[in-house]
Image (cartoon, rainbow, N blue to C red):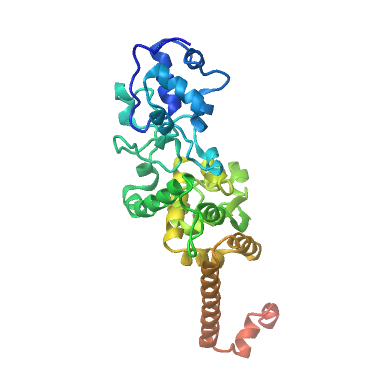
Amino acid sequence: MAGRLPVVPRPEADERLSSWLTRLAGLYAMPVDALLGHLGVGGTTVHDLEWRLPEGEGASIARGTGISPEELQAMTFGNIVPDARMMIAQRNRYRCPLCLSDTREAGVRRKAAAFPWTWRCPIHGASYVTSTGAELESLLGNERLAALDRHAEHGAARLSAWVRGEDDGDERVPAVPAMLDLLTARHRKPSPPSLSEQPRMSLQERRDNHAFLTRPIVRQALTVVVPEYDLVAPVLTKPVRAGLSSLATASLLQAYALAVGIGRLAEDPVDPVVAVLLASDAAGEGRVRTVLRKWPLTSRRCVYARFWRAQRSERDREAALKAARGPQSHKLRFSQSHYFRYAVS
C-alpha cells in the first residue's frame, strides 16, 4: 500500500462518504475506484462503503488520508434502519441555488440532502428547487406553506428519528410505517378528474382530451388528511406509491405533503382518521380498517368510537331535515309522478 496522500481536503459539514471520496479522487485526477485501490480498499464500491464501512477498510482509508475512523463512520449511513435504505438517494434529490453559485460547495453532497424530507439547504437555509426550477413556495404559495410548515417539520422530525431506529411509536401514536400505510391507503375507488380538478378547456379541447378527462385516478387518504395538497397537486400526479415506497419515489411536493400528513397524524391520531373513514366508500373503508389493525389499540378505540358518533349525528341530521320538510301532499306527489304529462293533457 502507498503512503499517506500529501493533500487531503477536510470533509464538509454533514458531507457523505461518497461525496468526500469523489472530491478526493478528483483532486488527484483519478477514478474513485482507483483511489480506493490506492488506499488498500478493493472489491467494493464507494456507495457500498456508505452503508457499511468495515473496521479494516475504515482503518485503511484513515491511514491513507489522515481522517480518523470516527469521522469516516460519521459520513456513512450505518445507523439507518434497513427499511429506510430505499429512501436514500445516491445524489442530492434537489438543488440549492446558493450552493450552485458557491464554488466551495461544488461537488459536495450532504447526508441530509439524500433524504426526501429535507426541503431546505442545511447550510444556507434556502429552499431546494427541482430540476425544472420549481420550489415549494411556487407550488403551494407562501401563505399556505407558512401554515403547513409546523406540521411538516414535526413529520420530518418523526421520520428522522425513525430512520435512526429511535421512534417506533407509543401507546397512542403509531410508528412511521403504519402512518404511511394509512396516508397511501385507497379510501375510494378510482374516479376520473372532477370538475374542480380539470383545467378550463373549450368544448373542442375537451373532445381532444377525452382520454384524460375519463381516466380513473387513484384516490388516497393523503388528500383527506392534507387537503391543501389535493388543491394544488396536478391531478395525474396526485397518487403516490404505497407505504414506505411513497417517500422513496416522491416528488418534492409529494414528499412535503407526506411529511405534513405524518405530522398531523402524530399530533392527532384520531380526528384525521375519522375524516378519512367518513370520506371512504364501502370498499375503501374496509381497506382503511385493515391498515388500522397495525395502530395502537388506544387510538383505534378512539377512532371507531368517534366515527360511530359522527355517523349517528349525520343520521340524526338527515332525519331532522326530513321531518322539517314534512310529508308531501298527494297533489304534489301526483305532479312529480311519471304520469303527470297524461294528467295535464
Q: In the rendered view, does 170 fall on the left or right side of 343? A: left
The percent position of residue 318, horizontal first and vertical second, equals 54, 80
The residue under the point 58% across, 55% down is 185
Near-viewer residue (282 or 256): 256
Q: In the rendered view, does 267 fall on the left or right side of 329? A: left
Residue 210 falls in which quadrant of the image? top right
The percent position of residue 106, horizontal first and vertical second, equals 35, 22
The residue under the point 44% across, 20% down is 61
The percent position of residue 203, horizontal first and vertical second, equals 55, 47
Residue 341 falls in which quadrant of the image? bottom right
> Is residue 249 among the parts visible in the rendering?
no
> Is residue 110 among the parts visible in the rendering?
yes
Near-viewer residue (47 or 120): 47
Count how many numbered circles sit on residues in the image: 0
The percent position of residue 56, horizontal first and vertical second, equals 50, 24
Quarter of the image that includes the C terminus: bottom right
- Compared with 255, 29 (above or below) is above
Near-viewer residue (68 or 262): 68
The residue under the point 54% across, 87% down is 323
- Compared with 145, 277 (above or below) is below
Q: In the rendered view, does 281 fall on the left or right side of 105? A: right
Q: In the rendered view, does 336 fall on the left or right side of 106? A: right
- Compared with 282, 326 (above or below) is below
The residue under the point 62% across, 47% down is 215
